[in-house]
Image (cartoon, rainbow, N blue to C red):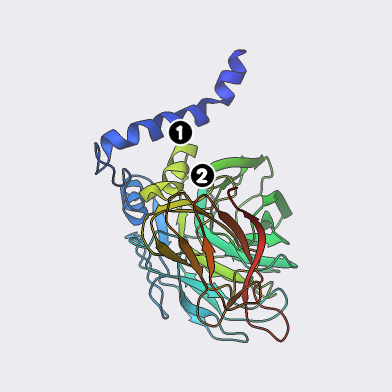
Amino acid sequence: MPIDSIYDLSDKALVEIKDWLKPWFRPGAGSTTATTLPFADEMAVLAATRDLRGYWRLGDGATPFADTSGNAGGPNNMVKTVIGTAMTDSVTGALPTADDDGAVQFNALGATTGDYLTATHVTLFRGSGDTTIALWVYPMSATGTQTIFGTMDVANGGWYFALSGLQMFFTRKDGGGTKTAVGPNLPLNKWTFVAVSWNPGAGVEFYLGGHLVYSDTVVQGVFDQTALRLGRRYTVPESFQGAVDEVSIWGVRLTAVEIATLANSGGLALSDGFTTSVVSTSGSYAATSHDDVILASGTSTITLPTADGITGKQITIKNIGAGTITVAQTGAETIDGSATDLTLAAADSVILVSDGGTTGSAAGWQIVGSYSYP
């Protein structure tokens, strides 16, 4: 293999080595329990040496949303501006149940005005040097331009991270003009861990689920704006419709290894566009919007999450035991338009997709595939 190819693979190799070593250096080593720290604890470990400038867990349930970074320039809490379409102050977050303290959901879309969050500091958030932003994102619409996070207004410049449809892009502006780097698509109705790192003189990198997926040499100068806005842009709405959790901004370019550590902390393995969340259970289980595949055994009931608000979400359930598995819906929701629960015999499986509700009917689940063992 050519030497330059070995260098190209170095970050990936380091991630694989670090993941292999984790069970030996994390709480729970030698056991079958979690071998990584919870997300917030991994953040604290990294923050001890890596200039964490702001960290908003967004589990407060009401404004203000606390900055827990511990930065000497803070705390710089996020405060809600009430305008137009109301946001939801508390929804289920991206992290596993034991670590999840909730998230926020923005409900306006595009040019529609809606509630948003702002945190202000004179210098911490300018992004004029090495910078990384990291957050969990759950897009609920693939329509139009939606700004998720940033500082940029039309007149004075700055930076922002946004979606065009579901395609990520990052824009920076100063007196010399506007520069944009375009990355890959985010999955719809799934939590994805996203990180964007940049240096105004060196370019920008996009990470999904801890994986480096795109880099660009787009450069730009010093930025003027000092306030962060979450959920829309300055001056023009470009509102984001979806949920956001565990938002952070760093005064360094985090390495690929550090970003992968955060993405995989606490044994997350959530849907990130690259991996599939697989749950194994031998008892009754309440499925969540994070679950992709549920392997059930025993004689038990799997209750589907509410289909409302997660249009297009797909869940596969398979009976891997000898008993009977009941698949139940939530509340008045239906499965294929019926209030009757499904039953899966041994080795049977079913694939369900949320319809999110259609005109004149409540949300429900549609069967798009099934298999019965002969």
Instruction: Report the Cα–Cα distance between label 1 and label 2.
Output: 9 Å
Residue, disc 1: 15
Q: Nearer the viewer, residue 192 or 286?
A: 286
Q: What is the number of the mark on residue 184?
A: none
**Quadrant of the rendered image containing residue 232:** bottom right
Residue at 55%, 83% (x, y): give it: 332
337 lies left or right of 131: right
Residue at 51%, 26% (x, y): give it: 10
Q: Nearer the viewer, residue 135 or 325?
A: 325
**Quadrant of the rendered image containing residue 223:** bottom right
Where does residue 159 sit, x and y in percent of width and height? 62, 59
Residue, disc 2: 210
The answer to the question of whether label 1 and label 2 lie on touching residues, with beta carbons closer than 8 A, is yes
Q: Is residue 35 visible?
A: yes
Quadrant location, the N terminus: top right
Q: Nearer the viewer, residue 14 or 220?
A: 14
Residue at 59%, 25% (x, y): give it: 8
Where does residue 296 sit, x and y in percent of width and height? 44, 54
Q: Is residue 25 above or below residue 119?
A: above
Under tag 2, what secondary structure?
loop
Badge 2 amino acid: Gly
Under tag 1, what secondary structure?
helix
Q: Is residue 24 above or below residue 106?
A: above
Badge 1 amino acid: Val
Q: Residues within 10 Å of mark 1 (few under 14, many from 20)?
A: some
Where does residue 243 sit, x and y in percent of width and height? 54, 68
Q: Is residue 337 above or below residue 190?
A: below
Where does residue 190 sit, x and y in percent of width and height? 57, 60
